[in-house]
Image (cartoon, grey):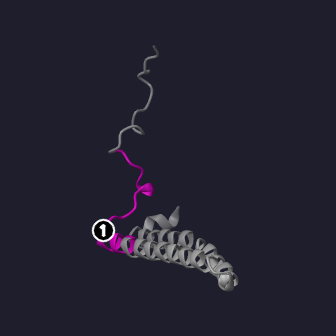
Amino acid sequence: MATRSSTCSTAAADPMDRDPKLTLPLGAEALVIHQRYETAVLANDFLIGLWFTLGSLAFLFPAYESAGAWIFLIASLQYVVRPSIRLARNIHVERLRRRRSPSAEKR
């Protein structure tokens, strides 16, 4: 069995030794931002489910098949909204982090 050499650094393995550039602020403002964006993601997911349910119901009636196809298209396009919301959240939190840490701009 291999043993660890005394020259190996264990700093990376210690969870208390974190690189400051990888730490995001978890103040009240960052938590509020996170909650608002997560609420937007949940609302989007709910609407996607609603669109697909309506589209499925429309396909049960031949006269509404065309409308059902359009509803499915809307629901499918709405899948793009979810990662867009999360990307916006990440950008927002990063800007907050940079505003609170002026040294982050210099990296």
Residue lying at the far left of the rendered structure: 28
Q: Which residue is mark 1?
A: 27
Q: Position of residue 25 (x, y in %)?
A: 36, 64
Q: Is residue 15 left or right of residue 93?
A: left
Which residue occupies the foreground of this view, 94 or 31?
31
At 40% from the left edge and 55% from the top edge, which residue is drawn? 20
| Quarter assignment of residue 51 | bottom right
Residue 47, horizontal then vertical, whole percent: 50, 78
* Residue 4 percent location from the top left of the image: 43, 21
Depth check: 104 or 65 in front? 65
User: Residue sitting at 44 percent across and 65 percent down?
Assistant: 103
Q: Quadrant of residue 1?
A: top left
Measuring from the top left, give residue 48's x and y in whole percent.
Answer: 53, 74
The one nearer the camera, 2 or 101, is 2
Q: Is residue 47 left or right of residue 101?
A: right
Q: What SS does tag 1 mark?
A: loop
Asked whether residue 23 is drawn in magenta, I would say: yes
What residue appears at the point 46 percent right and 16 percent down from the top-left corner? 2
Magenta stretch contains residue 15: no
Q: Extreme right residue here? A: 66
